[in-house]
Image (cartoon, helix red, strand yellow):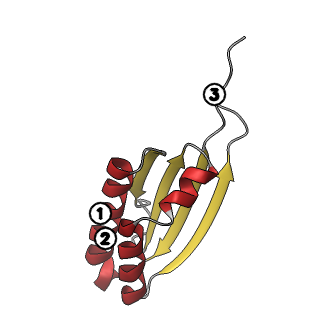
Amino acid sequence: MTKRSAPPFVVIPEFHVRPQIRTAFLNAALDDARHSLADEAGCRRFDVVCPEDAEDTVLFYEVYDNRAAFDAHLQTPHLKRFQATMKALEVEETVVRFAALENV
């Protein structure tokens, strides 16, 4: 019998970004994504996406090995840097967290 790995932990933050700060926000977001993928063994995926019909919205699609890997992400220097930029730019954030039911 093959042992299945634990289901991934998915995080989808949504940001409301004013047009005048969009470029600065996206630069900070892409820096956070690049470092998450390069520096964190437990980060499987980190996409920064913008819905076609909502120019003031940016979403992240983050996939971690498990909740512990996400918790480790919360302590990283690159996330602290992103959070400081987000605060300075006064960006609103809503976060939805998911635990996958199973690997498919």
Cα–Cα gap, marks 1 and 2: 5 Å
CA distance for labels 2 and 3: 32 Å
Whether residue 92 is situated above or below residue 77 in the rendered picture:
below
Task: Inspect the image, locate mark 1, and give the three-letter code of the amino acid beneath it.
Answer: Asp
Q: Is the residue under label 2 in contact with that under label 1 (CB below 8 Å)?
A: yes
The disc label shown at residue 3, or none: none
In the rendered image, the quadrant that contains the N terminus is top right
Q: Position of residue 40 (x, y in %)?
A: 41, 50
Which mark is first along the chain, 3 or 1? 1
Q: Secondary structure at mark 1?
A: helix
What residue is pinned by disc 1?
Answer: 31
Residue 4 in percent (x, y) is at: 67, 25
Instruction: Say which amino acid is labelled 3.
Output: Val
CA–CA distance in space, label 1 to label 3: 30 Å
The x and y percentages for residue 16 are 47, 77
Toward the viewer: 67 or 28? 67
The quarter of the displayed image where residue 25 is located: bottom left
Residue to which mark 3 is pinned = 104
| Residue for badge 2 | 28
Q: Label 2 amino acid?
A: Ala
Relative to the observer, which residue lies in front, 2 or 48? 2
